[in-house]
Image: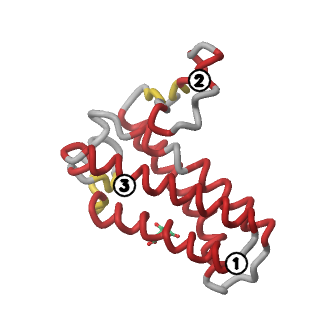
Amino acid sequence: MKFVHACAIAALGACSALPAAAQYQANFATSDSAIKYRQGAFSVMAAHFSRVAMMAQGIQPFDQKSAAENAELVASLAKLPFTAFGPGTDKGVPNRAKPEIWSQSTKFRASADKMIAESARMAEAAKAGNFEVMKAAVGAVASTCKGCHDDFRGSLRSE
Ligand code: ASC
């Protein structure tokens, strides 16, 4: 299933506004394609976040260039999944989205924005190359992941 990137159909000038996550809209042909898209975005984000987190935790040696690249990817990817929680995308292929995402959408949006903001801070910290500052920023991002999972991620279900 294809999704139509808003940028592909928007006037050229509008594309420069894309990094503002709140304004970014993606359109999906079906609920299944929206669910698969956001799951994919979260999976890729988690892969890159874990590379930074493993350095922050001392499991992998600190490689500043790699940390900066991976953190920058997280900050970019963070803007994507929340475009794919539109109305009606609660049902479809198996997923863990709780009904509260839609019934408490303001709170959900605030959680998403916090994660996006903390990811941007982490990317800045990794780029600056101070390990302790980066480590604190990684912890702040992880807290936003966990907070949102606690409130809005349930057990796997399909309907
Ligand atoms: C990860 C990952 C998450 C978060 C979360 C932090 O690496 O995949 O979902 O960190 O576990 O609490």
The image quadrant where one finds the C terminus is: top left
Give the image location of residue 65, x and y in percent.
Answer: 81, 66
Task: Determine the image quadrant of residue 27.
Answer: top left
Give the image location of residue 24, x and y in percent.
Answer: 49, 32
Q: Which residue is mark 2?
A: 7
Residue at x-position 49% and y-position 30%: 1
Per the image, label 2 sits on a secondary structure element best described as: helix
The mark closer to the camera, 3 or 2, is: 3
Residue at x-position 35% and y-position 66%: 147
Out of 8 and 122, give the one closest to the viewer. 122
Give the image location of residue 51, x and y in percent.
Answer: 66, 70
Residue at x-position 60% and y-position 13%: 11
Q: Which residue is mark 3?
A: 111
The mark closer to the camera, 2 or 1, is: 1
- The residue carrying pointer 2 sits among few (fewer than 14), some (14 to 19) or many (20 or more) residues within 10 Å by Cα, namely some
Q: Is residue 53 above or below residue 46?
A: below
Q: Distance between the Cα atoms at labels 3 and 2? A: 25 Å
Dot 3 or dot 1, earlier in sequence: 3
Q: Which residue is mark 1?
A: 131
Q: Is mark 3 within 8 Å of ligand 1?
A: no
| Side of 113 where 20 appears, left or right | right
Q: Distance between the Cα atoms at labels 3 and 1? A: 26 Å
Amino acid found under the numbered disc labelled 2 = Cys
